[in-house]
């Protein structure tokens, strides 16, 4: 099996990103910038497809990378990652041992801790999939192709609805019968700086959160909103009251549905 990184980035002017990220596999790089272009070149013996595009939006970037991928196993990647030297063998070993179309790995924070991970391998259900970040995900490309899996381009960084695109995608995978597994194996380190989209727990944040829950296309959107508001209250209680958070998430639900209807 072959492995390919699918890297989403912005405003790169040269190829030094590959060295910064410690890329040691084939890769598709989608660079959202102010020009259009495409080139394929060799980097340390690996095939790199570099796409410059004037399109905007993280979900559009992910979809473009997936459409141009050719490997058996694809890994979602952001430009603030540094990959471990053995990430290819780690990923291939996991896919040979686990019965999964998608596998979630561990990524460790550099400046500060990223997440508290479980030490046990497991199958991932709908609720557990909501805790997975895109940079932890590797998937079988043929599984995505057969089930026509795509990111929802109406949500995610660079859109009106700022977050949750990977969780919506994972819900889509589970509903279409794909299997998701988690393994405690580490694949990369992540620089944790100021977010390009998170500006605090404000109205815009909660509207985006409500839209993401709605995009999961479950009859229990209201329950997802209420459980998140209660369970995560400690995160936002200094910024906004719980009832206001719920009100704004419901506004996001309505806005997303209007946008879907056109």
Image (spheres, grey):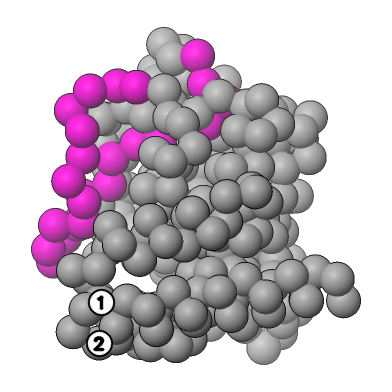
Q: Give the range drawn in magenta.
A: 99-122
In the image: residue 225, left or right of residue 42 = left
Q: In this view, does 141 lie above or below 251?
A: above
Q: Can residue 57 be seen in this view?
A: no
Q: Is the magenta stretch mostly helix, strand or loop?
A: loop
Q: Which residue: 23% across, 23% down?
A: 120
> Furthest-right residue in view?
262
Is 116 or 225 nearer to us in this picture? Answer: 225
- Regarding mark 2 in the picture, which secondary structure is present there? loop
10 Å neighbourhood of mark 1: few (<14), some, or many (≥20)?
A: some
Residue at 57% across, 56% down: 221
Q: Which residue lies furthest to the left in this view?
A: 112
| Place of residue 95 in the rendered image (x, y in percent of width and height, measured from the top left) | 47, 19
Residue to which mark 1 is pinned: 236
Considering depth in this image, is 67 or 15 the residue closer to the camera?
67
Left or right of residue 208: residue 82? left
In the rendering, at what x and y percent does residue 4 appear? Answer: 55, 40
Magenta segment: does it hold 90? no
Expressed as whole percent of the image width and height from the top left, the position of residue 216 reads 62, 52
Q: Residue at x 35, y 66 (%)?
A: 229
Examine the rendering and report whether any part of residue 237 can be seen. yes
């Amino acid at each position: 099996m072959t492995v390919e990184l699918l890297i989403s980035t912005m405003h790169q002017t040269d190829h030094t990103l590959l060295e910064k990220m410690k890329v040691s596999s084939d890769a598709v790089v989608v660079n959202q910038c102010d020009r259009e272009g495409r080139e394929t070149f060799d980097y340390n013996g690996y095939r790199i497809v570099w796409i410059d595009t004037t399109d905007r939006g993280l979900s559009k970037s992910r979809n473009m990378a997936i459409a141009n991928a050719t490997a058996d196993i694809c890994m979602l990647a952001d430009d603030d990652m540094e990959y471990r030297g053995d990430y290819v063998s780690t990923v291939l070993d996991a896919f040979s041992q686990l019965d999964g179309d998608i596998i979630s790995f561990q990524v460790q924070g550099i400046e500060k801790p990223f997440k508290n991970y479980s030490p046990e391998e497991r199958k991932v259900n709908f609720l557990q999939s909501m805790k997975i970040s895109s940079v932890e995900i590797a998937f079988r490309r043929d599984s995505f192709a057969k089930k026509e899996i795509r990111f929802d381009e109406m949500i995610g960084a660079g859109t009106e609805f700022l977050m949750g695109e990977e969780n919506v995608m994972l819900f889509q995978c589970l509903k279409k019968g794909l299997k998701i597994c988690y393994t405690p194996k580490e694949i990369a380190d992540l620089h944790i700086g100021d977010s390009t989209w998170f500006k605090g727990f404000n109205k815009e944040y909660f509207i985006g959160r409500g839209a993401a829950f709605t995009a999961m296309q479950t009859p229990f959107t209201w329950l997802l909103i209420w459980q998140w508001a209660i369970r995560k209250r400690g995160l936002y209680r200094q910024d906004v009251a719980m009832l206001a958070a719920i009100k704004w998430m419901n506004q996001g639900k309505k806005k997303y549905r209007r946008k879907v209807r056109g």
